[in-house]
Amino acid sequence: MTRIVLDPFVADLDGESAALRAAGPLAEVELPGGVHCYAVTHHAEARQLLTDSRIVKDINVWGAWQRGEIPMDWPLIGLANPGRSMLTVDGADHRRLRTLVAQALTVKRVERLRAGIEALTTASLDRLAALPKGEKVDLKAEFAYPLPMNVISELMGVDAADHPRLKALFEKFFSTQTPPEEVPQMMADLGALFTKIVDAKRAEPGDDLTSALIAASEDGDHLTNEEIVNTLQLIIAAGHETTISLIVNAVVALETHPEQRKRVLNGEISWENVIEETLRWNTPTSHVLIRFATEDVAVGDKVLPKGEALIVSFGALGRDEAQHGPTAGEFDATRSPNRHIAFGHGPHVCPGAALSRLEAGVALPALYERFPELELAVPASELRNKPIVTQNDLFDLPVELG
């Protein structure tokens, strides 16, 4: 099996995803830092593995981890071993940790957040409208980032004063370019910041999910302080990064497909279709780290060996022709049906999917209603991917608002 080396600079994610698909449903890959693992790259096999009880989140199953081959200063250590939370356990422990979060993020409960999301969106658009005419604007920094960060922070009870520090730390957390000598301190700083937030909520509870997690631990659900801190970190990280990329990628898709953009703005194509096709075609999450095989598992005509690590390559899955047909490589906002798994599948499916869809469903139409002449300020070929193997993320999104 030929090993595919994932580019730490993410210079050509589309090309890399195509190479992964071509390698078959199970590809042998090398993560930045020289860490070996396997990737599932086809839709059907991913659905199978994501519900296979032999594939677990316990890092102690990983042979390379047991043998001491994974250094603690590996830049991606925070994604491979983020501490005990609903992300890293299975079975009854996973259900216990996930229940409160899932209850807080049901479609019905998320819909109650719509008015607040609309107000935040309007405020962001007002700030954009106040900028000098003709000035290039980084739409990611000025619009796509503040909205989801403010929404998830309000949901979790995180003070806006902590946003700059969180932004700086998460930049290092996700990046493959964080110097190894800085990784342990970065992880310690993240833990200290979220511990501070939990301690503040323990002293003065509020109407937020962090306070609810603390209350549940005191009422007999037996969540440890480590579990609460790590769950808070997980939700904040996933709850804003995915939505930022979804909004940015949808704008890029529309601006590079002007005929479809016209039909969307004319009401011929729904924003829901735009969002679902963006999730499939240019998914916010390129690869999800990391699961481990408790025994040999057949994947097509190949085998994922016992003790090996598995990543899910969502960038490759979204353009699998076996699932999405011969036009899988094309952006088509009229695509129906559009049965992607951009938010995962099985027990660990993203509990924040409804919230991310709602935020994009409010933000995108409001953006184009306010600025219908919006266009990219640079050719799409000049947009730069950030060196993050998990998030399909850009450094910036320069636009002219018109």
Image (cartoon, helix red, strand yellow):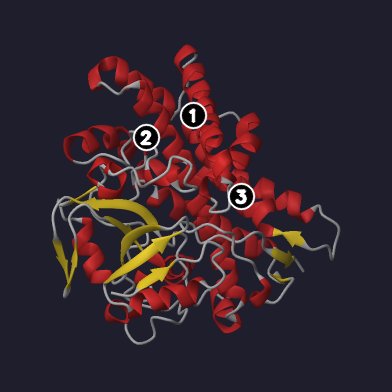
Q: Name the residue at 36% across, 36% down.
A: 104
Disc 3 target residue: 145
The amino acid sitting under disc 3 is Tyr
Circle 2 packing at 10 Å, graded few (<14), some (14-19), many (20+), is some
The label shown at residue 83 is 2
Mark 3 to mark 1: distance in Å? 22 Å
The amino acid sitting under disc 2 is Gly
The label shown at residue 165 is none
> Could you tell me if residue 389 is visible in this image?
yes
Asked if residue 10 lies left or right of residue 27, the reply is: right
Q: Name the residue at 37% across, 34% down.
A: 83
Of labels 1 and 2, earlier in sequence is: 2
Closer to the camera, 386 or 182? 182
Of labels 2 and 3, earlier in sequence is: 2
In percent of width and height, residue 366 lies at: 61, 58
Q: Name the residue at 53% across, 58% down.
A: 245
In percent of width and height, residue 101 lies at: 34, 36
Picture layout, residue 143 above or below residue 153: below
Disc 1 target residue: 191
* Label 2 residue SS: loop
In percent of width and height, residue 249 lies at: 55, 65
* Label 3 residue SS: loop
* Residue depth check, mark 3 versus mark 1: number of the one nearer the observer: 1
